[in-house]
Image (cartoon, rainbow, N blue to C red):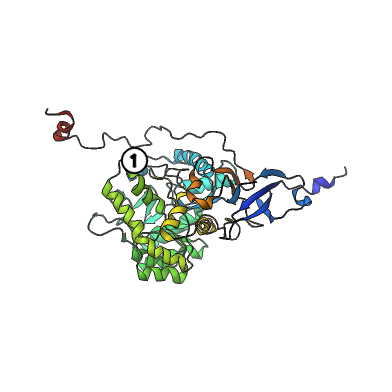
């Protein structure tokens, strides 16, 4: 039987986005152009000829703006918005965590985040979800993931909840050289994209020192980098004091989360090595600005606000010296629910670090490709790049917070396909044992009862 030419050459599925104003993610000013997508890649940006648009599906962007999809470079997709570390460490189940994360990933995608970095995860949910998304089992953004963060029991964000040894919640407790090497090997075997280290953490006795303390030595950090880099895997660190940022940079870390409270030595180490930074101000800003809506302690609100203001100048200097600044929301906690706040970091970088709107968009698009390990093929509207993009109702440069407003994102496209956002997703769920069940928000002393009810 004779085969037709069509059997040998399959026609690529094409999409023509016409008439839009392009913000390409590189910092270049907006310009009018058409965009041609060929399956999962961008084929052309510019003037298109009749042969280009033949048989192409048309998306009319006249009067609208087109930009790359947002990249959230600090997310925790497996956590499901806990209110406390107790809830996260003791109220989660492996299989259920993966199922819940698969729905939360859809919320993230529908918010215009077409890719994210899952910094660390409970169990191995990050690796499993990433593989399921890539295989088309579930819908979600592109993602890279760490495994359980390497941590010791002296300092962490959970303090005495951490055991002396073993694995709990998102952390793997390691102390010795052999334990560090073995755990890195296990995680790389499991398929992580990054190795994460909690370089700093809260002191065991709050108030004994100001802020977080460094809990790893420089030699230990070098050991982590040497072990991971030998196998081609980058290293990222949670660093929220000056010495932790300094030593992470000196040790060879490939990216640093937070990088707050830098001093001159830390800033010099970061700038000399051009270590990408993810300030992740959104978490602190949400608590500082909106914490009263959820009953937050005003003193705690002031502490979190101070972390932003005390760190902004050093981070601004890093940006001005050419250090890549990436956007991260730390979505996954009660203060940063999935789908709601991913856009906010762009405006915070503009407000506190002095980035222009175009520079802030670059932080949330082209520079985000660093966290996705796809530099040169993701995060910009260029020929040959992956076709992850947004069509917007208006100009985002007027006010970056528009990206979080209802109906401002007209269309989300991932891998050349329009994401169907018509079917509602559940906003919350009641799963037995999944959330902590508290007796009360306060202690019912007799005097408190009399304050509310009068003499007893």
Return the residue nearer the eye: 380 or 258: 380
Q: Residue at x 47, y 55 (%)?
A: 327
The image shows a total of numbered marks equal to 1
The extreme left residue here reads 455
Horizontal side, residue 353 vs residue 207: left or right? right
**Camera-side residue of 250 and 389:** 389
Q: Is residue 38 left or right of residue 192?
A: right
Position of residue 156 measured from the top left corner of the image (x, y, whole percent):
33, 54
Q: Position of residue 238 (x, y in %)?
A: 39, 58
Q: Where, quadrant-wise, is the N terminus in this rendering?
A: top right
**x%, y% of residue 441?**
26, 37
Vertical relation: 6 (above or below) 195:
above
Res 175 visible: no
Q: Nearer the viewer, residue 231 or 326?
A: 326
Q: Residue at coordinates 34% horizontally, 40% vertically from top-left?
A: 293
**Is 306 left, or right, of 414 in this rendering?**
left
Residue 14 place in picture, x, y as percent: 71, 47
Residue marked by disc 1: 293
**Residue 452, quarter of picture:** top left
């Amino acid at each position: 039987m004779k085969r037709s030419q069509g059997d040998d050459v399959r026609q690529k599925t094409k999409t023509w986005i016409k008439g839009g104003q392009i913000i390409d993610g590189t910092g270049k000013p907006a310009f009018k152009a058409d965009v041609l997508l060929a399956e999962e890649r961008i084929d052309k940006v510019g003037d298109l000829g009749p042969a280009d648009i033949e048989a192409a599906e048309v998306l009319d962007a006249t009067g609208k703006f087109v930009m790359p999809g947002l990249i959230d470079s600090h997310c925790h997709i497996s956590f499901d918005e806990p209110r406390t570390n107790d809830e996260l460490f003791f109220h989660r189940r492996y299989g259920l965590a993966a199922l819940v994360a698969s729905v939360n990933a859809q919320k993230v995608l529908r918010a215009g985040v077409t890719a994210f970095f899952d910094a660390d995860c409970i169990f191995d949910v990050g690796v499993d979800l990433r593989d399921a998304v890539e295989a088309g089992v579930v819908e979600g953004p592109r993602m890279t993931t760490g495994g359980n963060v390497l941590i010791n029991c002296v300092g962490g964000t959970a303090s005495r909840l951490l055991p002396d040894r073993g694995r709990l919640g998102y952390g793997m407790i390691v102390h010795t050289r052999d334990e560090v090497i073995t755990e890195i090997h296990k995680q790389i075997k499991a398929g992580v994209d990054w190795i994460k280290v909690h370089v700093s953490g809260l002191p065991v006795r709050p108030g004994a020192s100001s802020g977080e303390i460094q809990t790893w030595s420089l030699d230990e950090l070098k050991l982590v980098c040497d072990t991971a880099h030998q196998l081609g895997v980058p290293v990222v660190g949670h660093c929220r004091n000056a010495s932790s940022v300094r030593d992470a940079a000196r040790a060879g870390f490939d990216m640093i989360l937070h990088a707050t409270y830098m001093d001159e030595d830390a800033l010099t180490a970061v700038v000399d090595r051009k270590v990408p930074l993810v300030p992740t101000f959104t978490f602190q800003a949400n608590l500082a600005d909106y914490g009263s809506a959820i009953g937050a302690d005003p003193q705690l609100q002031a502490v979190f606000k101070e972390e932003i203001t005390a760190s902004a100048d050093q981070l601004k200097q890093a940006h001005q010296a050419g250090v890549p600044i990436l956007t991260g929301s730390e979505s996954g906690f009660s203060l940063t629910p999935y789908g709601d706040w991913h856009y906010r970091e762009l405006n915070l970088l503009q407000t506190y670090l002095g980035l222009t709107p175009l520079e802030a968009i670059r932080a949330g698009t082209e520079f985000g490709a660093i966290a996705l390990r796809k530099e040169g093929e993701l995060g910009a509207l260029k020929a040959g790049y992956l076709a992850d993009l947004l069509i917007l109702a208006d100009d985002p440069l007027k006010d970056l917070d528009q990206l979080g407003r209802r109906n401002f994102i007209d269309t989300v496209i991932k891998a050349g396909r329009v994401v169907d956002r018509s079917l509602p997703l559940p906003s919350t769920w009641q799963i037995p044992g999944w959330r902590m069940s508290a007796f009360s928000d306060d202690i019912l002393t007799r005097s408190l009862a009399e304050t509310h009810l009068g003499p007893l």
